[in-house]
Image: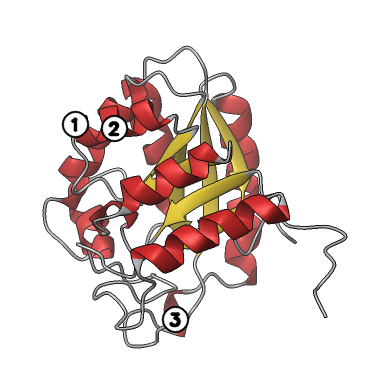
Amino acid sequence: MGVKWDEAPRSVVWEITLLCNLHCHHCASGGGRARGYEMSTAEALDLCDQFARLGVQSVCLFGGEAILRPDWTTLAERLREHDIEVNTVTNGWAMTEKLAEKMIGLGFSDIGLSLDAAEAEKHDRIRGRKGAFERALRTLDLIDSLPLPSKTLLTSVTRLNVDELPGIAELVASRITDPEPWMWMINVASCHDPERFGAEHVLDRKGYVELCRTINDLRTRYEGRLDLTGAHDIGYY
């Protein structure tokens, strides 16, 4: 007997690969190497068709680093054929003008960039690769120049970088030129992989309270430039 869907998800975050070029200490999925059982192109295209039949309206191609999967453009094209909005999140390492132009041509609705500190040493340490900060800033400038309906900054907060938020806000606000504000999603990292990220790095109760106060302060201070929102492990509660 078939399943009757009274209400399907409107938005989907699709982890199309675990392959990644960084080794972020807070990664909830343990990105790095691709799974041995990741979907073939044919299977992934079939899933795109299933999304359409369910009435899904938006799909975020996620990873790992989604653009490292060779057929990501093929999947995006199929989703767009179904008139499903497509967006993605990148760490910025492999992002180029050519890839950005491809995303614009495919009709992407948003490109998100992860930035976890306001200076190179700490961002690179969190992201597990020297040079990650400079590439993230290069990608920030690139995304800012694109004709996208929306643009998103993402920061994963731990005890290592909770004090970085004012500096990140100042840095980003000083670089962006788009008259429309960027969305800034503040995520609180959870302890998923103790070998990468121990429980001692997770915010405690006092840290959550201070984070909420910081978000409220920055939201007011940067209104019209950055639209702050609490997301994973904070906004939902």
User: Which residue does the image show at 39% across and 72% down from the upper left?
Assistant: 39
Quadrant location, the N terminus: bottom right
User: Which residue does the image show at 36% across and 75% down from the upper left?
Assistant: 38
- Which of discs 3 and 2 lies nearer the camera? The answer is 2
Q: Residues within 10 Å of mark 1 (few under 14, many from 20)?
A: few
Callout 1–callout 3 Cβ contact below 8 Å = no
Residue 123 in view of the camera: yes
Residue 114's disc number: none
User: Which residue does the image show at 32% across and 87% down from the upper left?
Assistant: 195
Residue 90 in view of the camera: no
Tell me which corner region of the image, top left, top right, bottom left or bottom right, holds residue 15.
bottom left
- Label 1 to label 2: alpha-carbon separation: 6 Å
User: Which residue does the image show at 58% across and 73% down from the upper left?
Assistant: 204
Q: Secondary structure at mark 2?
A: helix
Q: Earlier in the sequence, mark 3 or mark 2?
A: 2
> Residue at label 2?
102
143 is higher (above) or lower (below) than 126: above
Q: Earlier in the sequence, mark 1 or mark 3?
A: 1
Q: In the image shown, does 20 or 217 lie closer to the viewer? A: 20
Callout 3–callout 2 Cβ contact below 8 Å = no
- Which of discs 1 and 3 lies nearer the camera? The answer is 1
- Tell me: 170 left or right of 23: right
Q: In the image shown, does 56 or 227 lie closer to the viewer? A: 56
Q: Position of residue 121 (x, y in %)?
A: 18, 54
- Tell me: 124 left or right of 27: left
Q: In the image shown, does 134 or 216 lie closer to the viewer? A: 134
Query: The disc labelled 3 sits on which kind of residue?
Result: Glu
> Residue at label 1?
98
Query: The disc labelled 2 sits on which kind of residue?
Result: Lys
Callout 1–callout 2 Cβ contact below 8 Å = yes
> Residue at label 3?
200
